[in-house]
Amino acid sequence: MSTAESVSAAGQVVRNSGWSDLYLKEDWWAIWIGLGILALDVALFNGGSNLLKSLAINPGGLKWSSFDQLANHFSQNAQLYLFQFVAWLLIFGVSCRVMGMKLSEFIPSFVFLYVLSLIMFSVAGWVDATKYNLEPPLVALVVGLVLANAARLPTWMDTGFRVEYYVKLGIVLLGATFPIALVLSAGPVAIGQATVISLVTCLVIFFVGTRVFGLDKRLCAVIGVGGSVCGVSASMAIAASVGAKKEDLYTSVTLVVGWALVMILLLPFVSKILGLPSGVAGAWIGTSEFADAAGFAATSAYGKMVGNEDAAIKAFTLMKVIGRDMWIGIWSLVFALISTLVWEKKEVGARPGAGEIWRRFPKFVIGFFIASIFMSLVISGYSPEELNKTVKPSLILPLNSLRTWAFIFCFLSIGLTTRFRDLKAIGWKVFTAFTIGVLVNVVLGYILSVEVFGSYWAKI
């Protein structure tokens, strides 16, 4: 064994950390690309250019009702989609080649992935997509699973299905869309309520799973954060942070999607029976839903029931999209440290040294916080009115779109590399632990939204 190698806890030979990691590891490439996109976005915004906004195009917001509308969209924007495809191919192709992958395998695989992603966005752009909770990443996961299990894709295509690479880039871009100034604009009530919900729900699921049912701690970390924050994105981020198994991520996503669909039907109906004001119902849905698309669907449905959709959506956005979703980065950092400093110490029998801690630490989490801090500094001089009218649409929304592209690449890749025969069924212990967290989430969310801060949310 060379001096550049060591033995991991699983008995595998791994290369020790060095300067070469800066261009040979997916974590670092995700940071370089994510921060590079952010810097380009800021430079173009300051120069008055909409180039990145144009290159971040997708049909997800089209709201088409006929195939003719969809065809016209692609016909009118064919050049932009071509430029976008070439940009993604260059970014991922060059970096993957440097990391040792074959372009002869990566390029055709990525072409397939990009075309499928366009289809996923198109489905989400259907006028009734929100009604049926057709969120692009979720649709991508289902389609990927169907293709992987109904057809036999060549194994070499896995070269382009870089699950962790895509999600790490998505998380870095997520940090750029959550500048600290924007988070603070939600106010102490939304931030405080989101903090209580995130902490209590996550800890309940984690400790019930590990202490009561004896489940694997990495699995419980994934479902705990998935049930307490933004289920889909959070599950991916935590799975990467703690080194969870693919089936752990799939389990969490399944539970999140299942309960999200239940809440779409349940929360507006119960809110109507209770006669909740729009803002109060929006806040409660924001503390109880597990996916942004599902939450928007439930919130919009209730707002239309009572004739005040704007207040419901505003409260939901403050509570869920800003308040809770920012915890993705926080939990990623916390569980990464716990996994490295505590769990691996018990598994290996000795606490890893500083160099080993750094080698195992998920660097993309650092990218998340750098992006958030940098964007905070960029927008610090703008007034709230300017943030809403200029900064969000021209600076932040393009990053949102590119982040969604990365997540769709990730979810398609998860599905396309997953075989049902290789997965374990979701046992009753996992389901029960998650469901207990759901009940805590809903009840605590009601108490905070209605009883404690009801007067605040009613004025939204």
Image (cartoon, rainbow, N blue to C red):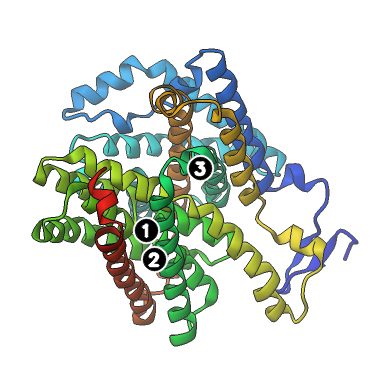
Of mark 3 and mark 2, the one earlier in the sequence is: 3
Question: In the image, is 254 to the left or to the right of 224?
Answer: left
Name the residue type under label 2: Phe
Residue where numbered disc 2 is placed: 420
Q: Is residue 265 above or below residue 304?
A: below
- Neighbourhood count class around disc 1 (C-alpha, 10 Å): few under 14, some 14–19, many 20 upward: some
Cα distance in 3D space between marks 3 and 2: 30 Å
Spot occupied by residue 425 in the image (x, y as percentages of width and height): 37, 74
Q: Is residue 95 above or below residue 457?
A: above
Name the residue type under label 1: Asn
- Of the numbered discs in the image, which one, if any, rests on residue 250? none
* C-beta proximity under 8 Å, tags 1 and 3: no
Quadrant in the picture for the N terminus: bottom right
**Visible residue check, residue 152:** no
Quadrant in the picture for the C terminus: top left
Q: Nearer the viewer, mark 1 or mark 3?
A: 3
Question: In the image, is 88 to the left or to the right of 439?
Answer: right
Spot occupied by residue 439 in the image (x, y as percentages of width and height): 29, 72
In terms of image quadrants, where is residue 303?
top left
Of mark 1 and mark 3, the one earlier in the sequence is: 1
* C-beta proximity under 8 Å, tags 1 and 2: yes
Residue where numbered disc 1 is placed: 149
Q: Is residue 246 above or below residue 179?
A: below
Of residue 418 and residue 357, the one placed in the foreground of this image is 357
Residue where numbered disc 3 is placed: 174
SS at mark 3 in the image: helix
* C-beta proximity under 8 Å, tags 3 and 2: no
